[in-house]
Amino acid sequence: MTTTQKTEPQDVAKKTPKTASGGAPKSGAAEPVGEMRQRTEDYARLARRADAEAAVFRPRDLTGQARRLHVRSTIIEDHMVRIDQKAAGADEKFRVLSESFFSFFRGTSLLFHRDMAGEDARMPTVLCLGDVHPGNFGVMPNADNVPIFGVNDFDDVIYGPFVWDLKRGTAGFMIAAEVEGGLSRKKQRKIARHFLKGYRAGMSFFAEHNTERHVEMREDNCPDIIRPLFGKAGRSRERWLGKRYLDETGRGFRANDELTPVSSRTEEFQKLVKALAGQNGIEAGGRHGPLKVKDVAMRHGQGTASLGLPRFYVLLEGPSGDARDDIIIEFKKARRSALEGLVPAHDFDAGDQGDRIAHGQSVHLAQGDVFYGNVEIEGESFMSRERAPFRNDADLDDLSKKEWKRYAYACGHALAQAHARSDDLGQLDYDIEPAILQAMEPAKLFIDDILCFAEEAVERLRRDHAMFRRDLKLGAFEVTEKRYR
């Protein structure tokens, strides 16, 4: 087997430039580990080698202390900015990751996908969701503000082999069924199998009927297991705004542990909303109201993978003008996809940061949220979307054993539709559904291969989680790694 040190790039000693007086600097003896972009390129080279050579050494082949150092280094790298800036959300995220194995899985997508660097190059390419698990499906508004069910997190979208989403999703369902459902290993495998069967059935359906471009999973046509998630569809927007967001006057955001009003930035965000409306063809009037910004607030403590990243809520005046139907637009700092540089080489480009995320939503969802887009704030890319009173996802800990299977099947079907749209609204220039169905044959063998991969990944991640918890107690994530002369 071919091995390479680039699988886990090491910090190497280097000469420090001398000062004007000829001596070494007395301060700054330690400097941050190389740029994240350099590390990404290190792994991109590994991914290219995996495609070109018969066998390569990947991070998942590391064991013991070597694996522990890899886990530590990868998590520090993924949170480098948040750690250096002493972001409160970074400490909160590490606490969340420590307390729950499922949260650890959700919050360490980079660690998971580096173990797959360059794999599955022969498989058909789609616009991958990138972070598939039971919590990333749910009910959200479409372009007409009608609630629909589907994939709902596009932060990691990227073109890559369709099986990458199936591998991540299968592992995610196994871990969630264990942690949230308290189910045995045998039942976890059955649930994950239903996810894969739902995907295959969905892909077969869209190959035959070619309806993926326009069909939506609504309350009137969704599976019974999904219907309860539409329960918030009739929720009063006025009550939702008053209970969670608006101050007593109704003219701005309240201040609490989740929201910090920054009303002085209203004019700045008014320009951003105008630019977003221009990008997406949103016209003033109708349900969008005058597109007038009433207030701006910083939002704290939201998400799992994105905890600690800057996030703003912008309050738009609703059509009535009396705060009953105001609109909230979220602007969240966009990060690079965890799969960047790791997927096998292909001819498709989803864009960068916020543009990439907006592209993912426009491809994956029929008639999606019109406020999805990309703006620049203080020189950095931010994605945008509408918050809605009926956004909802499944309460996984309330699902029965049978409901877990039905929910997994429905999610597999929804993911199949997202992938099937890669050739309708994405960049693929050939019919993707027949290619995927052919690549999944023989079906029993394909499903067993994915299940075996996921079982190994889950056990590896379980050990990684124990290493992470030990390192967290020892202060490993309080500062970024340095290299010394």
Image (tube, rainbow, N blue to C red):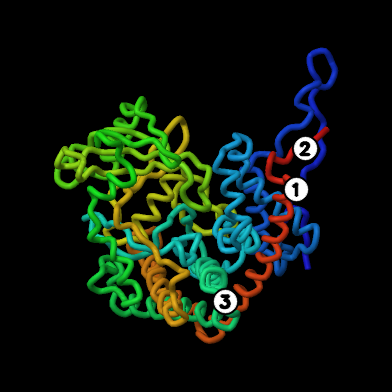
Position in image of residue 214 (x %, y %): 25, 66
- Which disc, if any, is residue 41? none
Say what amino acid the circle numbered 1 marks.
Leu
Instruction: Check the picture and name the quadrant holding the C terminus.
Output: top right
Measure the C-alpha gap from mark 2 to mark 1: 20 Å
* Element class at badge 1: loop
- Which disc, if any, is residue 483? 2
* Element class at badge 3: helix
The answer to whether residue 105 of the structure is visible from this angle is: yes
Q: Residues within 10 Å of mark 1 (few under 14, many from 20)?
A: few
Residue underneath mark 3: 450
Q: Nearer the viewer, residue 409 or 419?
A: 409
Q: Residue at x 42, y 66 (%)?
A: 395
Instruction: Check the picture and name the quadrant holding the N terminus.
Output: bottom right
Q: Which mark's residue is nearer the viewer, 2 or 1? A: 1
Q: Indicate whether 281 appears above or below 293.
A: below
Q: Nearer the viewer, residue 465 or 399?
A: 399
